[in-house]
């Protein structure tokens, strides 16, 4: 009988100070700005990246776009859209990386390490979480990443995929259990930036966009939040249980 081994899955979470990349010096030039790398890919030798930048005041917007476009690894920087209430800018970047560095995503993908969530940029570091199917893939990717800059490993573990899928199912069911009115108010709150940091609007401003008064809008949000957070709670507790079991 052949020896059939069940493939493992590893979750590798790390941050990197990406030497020579715009992410390294973004907060030196713009201390309050926070970034999310929505996607990044190569097209005919050029790396195309879409980023979301938050805490961008309108008075600094043009300066930020110009700074990104003039960065050594970039060819162009173009504003796609801007939300002045949420101080949020979506920016498209194109670069050929004709320097001693390259996009982190290139290193990850060629080593079969696949991001699970968009990478974030804060305080001069890129924060990534990826899945890989072997320690060898993670080790090789880690060594190549060290050629790009200083790497700090946050965790390397076997994710609880069954638990994660169960948790996601429970969250989906919680969302589906919302009444049409609760879903309407919650969706509007998200769209208007009520849950942004800093908040782009308050309860009073949401009520002005609704047919209900302030207390009713607040009650709809509280009931919606309670349903969703109860579904999310077991997922938040899982890492703590895993650490306890390991100790």
Image (cartoon, grey):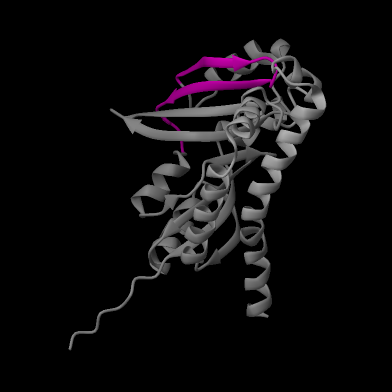
* x and y, in percent, of residue 37 in the image: 52, 35
Q: Is residue 68 above or below residue 122?
A: above
Residue at image point 45% right, 19% down = 75
Residue at image point 64% right, 47% down = 228
Q: How many marks?
A: 0
Q: Is residue 243 above or below residue 49?
A: below
Tell me, yes or no, whether the highlighted magenta stretch contains residue 77. yes
**Residue 177 is drawn in which quadrant?**
top right
Residue 142 shown left or right of residue 47 in the figure: right
Residue at image point 52% right, 49% down = 173
Q: Residue furthest bottom?
A: 1
* x and y, in percent, of residue 15 in the image: 60, 50
In-front residue for pair 218/88: 218
Q: Residue furthest left?
A: 1
In-front residue for pair 30/11: 11
* x and y, in percent, of residue 57 in the image: 72, 17
Q: In this view, does 102 lie above or below 142?
A: above
Tell me, yes or no, whether the highlighted magenta stretch contains residue 236. no
- Image: magenta residue range: 75-100
Residue 159 in view here: no
- Quadrant where the C terminus lies? bottom right
Residue 191 in view here: yes
* x and y, in percent, of residue 34 in the image: 66, 32
In-front residue for pair 105/82: 82
Q: In this view, does 182 lie above or below 137?
A: above
What secondary structure predominates along the stretch shown in magenta? strand
In-front residue for pair 82/47: 82
- Quadrant where the N terminus lies? bottom left
């Amino acid at each position: 009988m052949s020896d059939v081994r069940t493939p493992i899955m590893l979750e590798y979470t790390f941050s990197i100070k990406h030497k020579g990349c715009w992410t390294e010096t973004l907060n030196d030039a713009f201390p309050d700005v926070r970034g999310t790398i929505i996607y990044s890919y190569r097209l005919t030798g050029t790396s195309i990246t879409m980023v979301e930048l938050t805490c961008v005041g309108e008075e600094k917007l043009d300066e930020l776009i110009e700074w990104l476009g003039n960065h050594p690894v970039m060819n162009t920087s173009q504003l796609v859209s801007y939300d002045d209430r949420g101080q949020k800018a979506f920016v498209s970047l194109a670069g050929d990386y004709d320097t001693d560095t390259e996009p982190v995503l290139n290193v990850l993908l060629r080593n079969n390490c696949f991001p699970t969530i968009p990478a974030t940029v804060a305080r001069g570091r890129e924060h990534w979480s990826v899945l890989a199917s072997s320690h060898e893939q993670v080790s090789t990717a880690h060594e190549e990443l060290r050629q790009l800059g200083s790497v700090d490993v946050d965790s390397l573990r076997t994710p609880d995929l069954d638990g994660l899928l169960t948790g996601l199912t429970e969250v989906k069911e919680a969302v589906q259990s919302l009444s049409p009115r609760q879903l309407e108010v919650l969706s509007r709150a998200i769209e208007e930036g009520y849950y942004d940091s800093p908040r782009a609007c308050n309860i009073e401003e949401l009520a002005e966009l609704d047919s209900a008064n302030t207390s009713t809008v607040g009650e709809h949000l509280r009931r919606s939040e309670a349903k969703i957070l109860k579904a999310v709670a077991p997922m938040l507790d899982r890492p703590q249980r895993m650490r306890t079991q390991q100790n």
